[in-house]
Image (cartoon, rainbow, N blue to C red):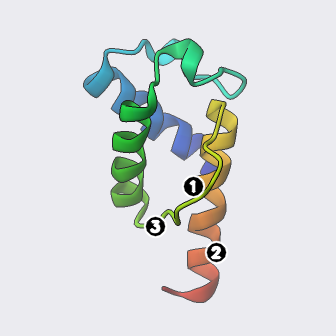
Amino acid sequence: MQDMQTIELLRQYLETKASIDPAKVVPEARLVDIGIDSLILMDLMFELEESLNVRVPDVDTQPKTVSELTQVFDSLAAAQLKTGT
């Protein structure tokens, strides 16, 4: 299941780079509540782009929860597999 792979990548990244307890990184958690500010989110987006080999387009709204963030990356990864790019 792609969603669990993405959450695990989030947990690893946030623990090593931002000292955030991986146990707090659950789908329903609000990013701001677990200590993810806009700078961490931007760095995280770059890290996930590289790890999942996807390109995140510029969007007007940022994800607010762990679940929303994983959905963004999982849908991009799935679209990339479909197109083969």
Q: Is residue 84 placed above or below 63 in the rendered structure? A: below
Residue where numbered disc 1 is placed: 73
User: Could you tell me which secondary element the residue under label 3 belongs to?
Assistant: loop
| Marks 1 and 3 in Cβ contact (< 8 Å) | yes
**Res 49 → quadrant:** bottom left
Q: Earlier in the sequence, mark 3 or mark 2?
A: 3
Tally the marks. Answer: 3
Counting from the top left corner in percent of width and height, residue 57 is at 53, 66
Q: CA distance from mark 3 to mark 2?
A: 9 Å
- Kindly identify the residue that appears in the image at 59 percent across and 58 percent down: 59
Q: Residue at x 45, y 25 (%)?
A: 37
Q: Which residue is mark 3?
A: 54
- As helix, strand or loop, the secondary structure at mark 1 comes to helix
Rendering coords of residue 71 (x, y %): 67, 49
Q: Residue 25: percent from the left, percent from the top? A: 55, 22
- Give the residue type at disc 2: Ala
Q: Amino acid at mark 1?
A: Phe
The residue that disc 2 covers is 79
